[in-house]
Each structure stands twice: as structure tokens, then as C-alpha cells.
Amino acid sequence: MTNAKLASLMARGTEFLGCDVAILCGAMSWVSERHLVAAISNAGGFGVIACGAMTPDLLDKEIAATKALTSRPFGVNLITMHPQLFDLIDVCAKHEVGHVVLAGGLPPKGSIEAIKQKGAKLICFAPALALAKKLARSGVDALVIEGMEAGGHIGPVSTSVLAQEILPEMASQLPVFVAGGIGRGELIAGYLEMGAAGVQLGTRFACATESIAHPNFKKAFFRASARDAIASVQIDPRLPVIPVRALKNAGTEAFTAKQREVANLLDSGAVDMGEAQLQIEHYWAGALRRAVIDGDVEGGSLMAGQSVGMVAKEEPVADIIAQLMDEAVVALERRA
């Protein structure tokens, strides 16, 4: 009965995504690439390629390589501030990608129409109820509400508060996926019962067997507790710096110094605000690559959510998903 109940609670999400289990993989730059994405989709979840700063040509190759590893549905996460956003949308359309996730702010003019007219379903992030309503009016097909417990770029409000604010208002209008700080199936069951169509997890999958992350990166996750994943600090109010949650290391301190450097360039007139923001984004992309790919866990960025304390060992994606579903079933049985 409870397996049937779990399937029923997830039905809206699985139907929307076209998969067996309504779990999206968070788009983690350098981590959410062809191997992890295909593994998650093959295991019944929904993998999402992190386009990040990729050029259209690189994204073209990444989608093709992912399709060679899975015949199951997967999506592509695009950053709204990417200077070639519309070219990237065209690449997704060329490959008939069924779902595009837009992250990093409000969709620029024409982007929603460009994605949807080519047949893809559009998922956007909504860090506040007012924005969730605005996006729904704009024609977005589904929402992700992600709390500040998540890794990488974060907002100021916790997942539990966002879920209480947004799910009662929006879940009847369109599928809403909950993200941030989710590490066990009991919590997944709770959000599903509140009206969520499914969930999104990143940190839990970062150290999967199929993840290409460097062994040093994975070991740092295994050693960490929830309190080690801290949010970066904005030191100059002029710089629109979105906080980033990562494991504290020398790279965290280096980001503070980078902000001072960019602020000084602004003072001298050497760069404008757009270039300043770009320099900061490039810093994070480079720092994350040093940690994930090169294994520099001191100078690189160890982006991780507060659920990192529940990541204790390297496991195949299929085992992680099976464990989460088993925990969700047990939770629902207790409440029956």
C-alpha cells in the first residue's frame, strides 16, 4: 500500500519529467556532466546537465555524449546571465532536450518563449512567493524552490519556510520541486505530502561512484559535518554578490580577497558593474574546477549543502536513489 502511496504522491512529478522517481539532480558545475547525469536517469531519476559557462559547441558535445550513455529523459540547466543564452537554447532544441532549467535570476526577455516554442518544458527557480507567482504568469511549466541549506549559490530563506509559503499557494497550479538540505527519504516523503511534485538533490549525488569529482574532493565531503558548509560573506554592498555555500577552506578566504580586489577596480573606474560581476562568477567557476577536477581542496571551492554530513561514503547512484525511496516508504508506513 505504501509503495503505491509513494508512487501516487510522486505521480505528478514523474509524469512531468518522464522518469520513474521524481528526483532531479541539482546542476553542479563540473560534477553534473554526462556520466553522473546518465547514471541518474538510468537509475530512474532525472539527471540535469550543468551548462554553466560552457560555449554552445561544448554544450552540443555534452548533450550528444549524454545521449550516447542513456536513452532516458534528462534536462539541461542554463544560466540566465550567459552571454550566449539564446544560442544555448538553440543547441537544446537541436537535440530535442525535453526540459530546460533556467537558473541565476529572472529569465531575460524572450527566453521563455524561445524555450517553449521549440517544444521544451521550462523549469525555473523561485526563491520567493511573489517571484513564483510572476513566473507562473509568465508561462513557466514548473518551479524549483531551493532553500539556503543548499550548496553553491543560495538565497536567504530556509527550505522549510519556502515550502510552507509556496507549496500551499502554487502546488495546485503547476509542479513544484523542493530543494536544499535534503539528504534522507523521510524528508522527501514530508515534502511530497505537503504538495511537492518531487525534490531536487545535489550534495547527496556529488560523491556517487559515477561522479567524476576528484577523490580528494569526495574525501573532503566524507569528513565534513553540516556546520562545515558555510555561506560566503558579501563585503561590499555595491557588488551584487549572491552568497555561495561551500566547505570552509583557504579558497573561502581567497574569495573575500577577490571581492576587495574587484571593489578596488570599481573605485578606480577600471571596470564597470557588469564586468565586476563577471569577474566574480569566473572566480567561482575556476575555483570549483580546481577542487572538483584537479583535487585542490585547499585553494579550490568545495561547494556543498548542509546535508554534506549525510554523505559518508562513495555509492552507486542506483543505491542512493533506492535508499532514499526505502526511507520514504518507511516514513509513510509510520504515518499510515
Image (tube, rainbow, N blue to C red):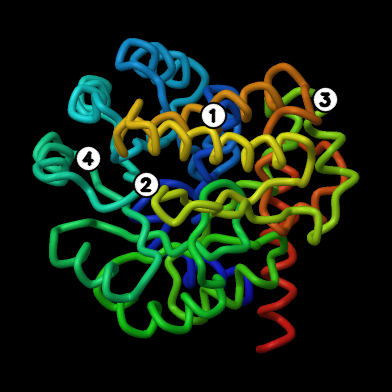
Q: Is residue 224 left or right of residue 206?
A: right
Q: Nearer the viewer, mark 3 or mark 2?
A: 2
Q: Please tell me how crowded label 4 is: few (under 14), some (14-19), or many (20+) other residues with Cα within 10 Å.
A: many
Residue 317 shows up from this direction? no
Residue at x 20% of width, y 22% of height: 87
Q: Choose the circle earlier in sequence order: 3 or 2.
A: 2
Q: Nearer the viewer, mark 1 or mark 4?
A: 1
Mark number displayed over residue 220: none
The residue at which mark 4 appears reads as 120
106 and 317: which is toward the camera: 106
Q: Choose the circle earlier in sequence order: 3 or 4.
A: 4
Amino acid type assigned to the residue bearing label 2 in the image: Gly
Mark number displayed over residue 283: 1
The residue at which mark 3 appears reads as 215
Q: Are marks 1 and 4 in contact (CB under 8 Å)?
A: no
Q: How far from the left and from the top, in percent, is residue 269?
A: 32, 31
Residue at x 60% of width, y 30% of height: 31
Residue at x 24% of width, y 74% of height: 173
The residue at which mark 2 appears reads as 104
Q: Is residue 191 above or below residue 321?
A: below
242 and 303: which is toward the camera: 242
Q: Nearer the viewer, mark 4 or mark 2?
A: 2
Q: Is residue 100 left or right of residue 32?
A: left
User: Disc 3 to disc 2, how far (Cα)?
Assistant: 29 Å
